[in-house]
Image (cartoon, rainbow, N blue to C red):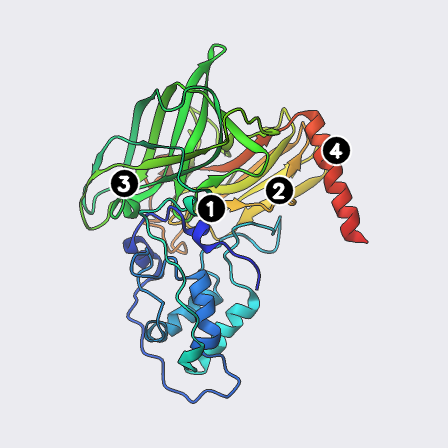
């Protein structure tokens, strides 16, 4: 079975069962009709439980955001028809990449294989037999939102920063919380960051924080420089930079908190989102300096700093494209699309200086209720020369065929609420020197030649 990282894939899952119930529809599933399965049919204990424990249990457990647990045979049998439909359509586990185009090698791929989907479908079709309980695997370790997920790999963070408190009313509109706080006395000299993680407070804050950012900014040579100390989204974990890579921050400046809350049916009083930061050792200078996730837009400014030209007519499909020219070589470590409830597709394509074009990544089943960051395998991460054009393409579906469209009769323009729209991608970026680019390109060529033998 291919390697997965379900815990990392679930870090920061913030909106509770309200959103998922909206997506998944009614959960009054009828019981599976009792049948006598053929001897070769998959059973829950031996074949299905290992799949659910590895790929589903992080969310579908008592402390998770899934609308029901799937840890026992009785739970799974009750929802067997729904499970079959969701895995057959690849709606669950959430992995929205177009698997027919672009790079397909990701560190955090939680999608099911064809054989796993087939096993679940055959199990349901056979009447969902339990099998021998003695063959049931042990329950997996189940994290909750009180823990820093990266701490399991990195140990305790070097420092933690906290946003000002915000009360999120029950059953209200989206809340967009923007605040500035000082950053002083946390570190005593410039340091390189190894990893960051942002989350809402536990237990209710993690249910209402849909996505958000905290960035550290300072003045440098007459201009403001900023670096992310945490970017969170539903389905997105923390950011752990590759080996020999770090993000340089200064010991003073200001923190900008930009947090999007989606209310639930319960008031959340004094929610305080927090971010954890892990540092490289003092004196360590990495070979590669990253700038973390950076925003690349498909829209244009108009009368606004950005996104002023988004205008989607009622009952329409609209496509928008934007281009960005790389002034330095770059290594792209991750791809995270961002639209809102009318978003359906978004892609990043590279147009190389010699005219060659390559689709890097495309999401064709975008779902605003998930904010997944697709983390490229190190040896497959796009390595792009100076002069490469990044072509960002966004497609919105403002029709009744869009199952999460709140009202296809409305014009839709740029805005921060989920019912408004945006059009940008977040790319984990490490800019390179020309020498670094040549060396990495040569290493890739040697690896490719070895694989071709």
Q: In this view, does 328 lie to the left or right of 418?
A: right
Q: Can residue 383 be seen in this view?
A: yes
Q: Looking at the rendering, which quadrant does residue 432 occupy?
A: top right
- Which residue is painted at 30% across and 65% down in the image? 26
Q: Mark 3 points at which residue?
A: 174
68 up-or-down from 247: above or below: below
Q: Which label was assigned to residue 153?
A: 1
- Where residue 209 sits: x, y (%)? 31, 42
Of labels 4 and 1, earlier in sequence is: 1
Of labels 2 and 1, earlier in sequence is: 1
CA gap between label 4 and label 1 equals 42 Å
Front of the two marks 2 and 4: 2
- Which residue is painted at 56% across and 47% down in the image? 362
Front of the two marks 4 and 1: 1
Q: Looking at the rendering, which quadrant does residue 242 occupy?
A: top right
CA gap between label 2 and label 1 equals 22 Å
Of labels 1 and 3, earlier in sequence is: 1
CA gap between label 3 and label 2 equals 35 Å
Camera-nearest residue between 315 and 100: 100
| Element marked by disc 4 | loop
Disc 2 packing (10 Å; few <14; some 14–19; many ≥20): some
Camera-nearest residue between 298 and 361: 361
Q: Name the residue under label 2.
A: 381
- Where residue 142 sits: x, y (%)? 37, 58
Disc 1 packing (10 Å; few <14; some 14–19; many ≥20): few
Of labels 3 and 2, earlier in sequence is: 3
| Element marked by disc 3 | loop
Q: Name the residue under label 4.
A: 354
68 up-or-down from 81: above or below: above
């Amino acid at each position: 079975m291919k390697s997965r990282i379900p815990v990392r894939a679930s870090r920061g899952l913030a909106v509770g069962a309200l959103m998922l119930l909206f997506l998944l529809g009614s959960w009054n599933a009828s019981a599976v009709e009792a049948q006598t399965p053929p001897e070769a049919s998959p059973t829950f204990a031996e074949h299905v439980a290992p799949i659910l424990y590895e790929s589903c249990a992080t969310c579908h457990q008592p402390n998770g955001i899934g609308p029901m647990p799937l840890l026992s045979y009785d739970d799974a049998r009750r929802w067997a028809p729904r499970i079959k439909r969701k895995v057959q359509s690849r709606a669950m586990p959430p992995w929205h990449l177009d698997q027919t185009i672009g790079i397909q090698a990701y560190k955090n791929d939680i999608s099911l294989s064809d054989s796993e989907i087939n096993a679940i479908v055959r199990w349901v079709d056979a009447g969902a037999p339990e099998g021998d309980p003695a063959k049931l695997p042990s329950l997996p370790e189940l994290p909750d939102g009180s823990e820093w997920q990266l701490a399991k790999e990195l140990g305790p963070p070097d420092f933690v920063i906290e946003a000002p408190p915000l009360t999120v009313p029950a059953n209200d509109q989206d809340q967009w919380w923007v605040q500035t706080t000082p950053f002083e006395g946390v570190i005593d000299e410039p340091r390189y960051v190894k990893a960051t993680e942002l989350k809402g407070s536990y237990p209710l804050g993690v249910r209402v924080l849909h996505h958000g950012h905290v960035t550290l900014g300072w003045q440098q040579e007459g201009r403001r420089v900023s670096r992310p100390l945490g970017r969170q989204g539903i389905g997105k974990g923390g950011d752990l930079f590759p080996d020999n890579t770090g993000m340089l921050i200064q010991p003073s400046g200001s923190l900008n908190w930009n947090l999007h809350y989606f209310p639930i049916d319960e008031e959340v009083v004094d929610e305080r989102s927090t971010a954890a930061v892990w540092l490289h050792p003092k004196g360590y200078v990495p070979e590669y300096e990253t700038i973390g996730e950076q925003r690349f837009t498909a829209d244009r400014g108009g009368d606004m700093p950005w996104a002023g030209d988004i205008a989607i007519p009622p009952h329409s499909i609209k496509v928008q494209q934007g281009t960005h020219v790389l002034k330095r070589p770059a290594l792209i470590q991750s791809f995270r699309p961002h639209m809102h409830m009318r978003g359906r597709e978004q892609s990043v394509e590279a147009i190389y200086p010699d005219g060659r074009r390559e689709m890097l990544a495309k999401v064709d089943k975008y779902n605003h209720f998930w904010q997944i960051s697709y983390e490229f395998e190190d040896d497959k991460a796009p390595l792009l020369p100076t002069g490469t054009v990044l072509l960002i393409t966004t497609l919105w579906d403002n029709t009744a065929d869009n199952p999460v469209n709140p009202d296809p009769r409305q014009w839709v323009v740029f805005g921060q609420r989920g019912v408004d729209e945006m059009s940008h991608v977040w790319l984990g970026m490490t800019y390179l020197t020309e020498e670094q680019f040549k060396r990495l390109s040569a290493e890739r060529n040697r690896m490719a030649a070895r694989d071709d033998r």
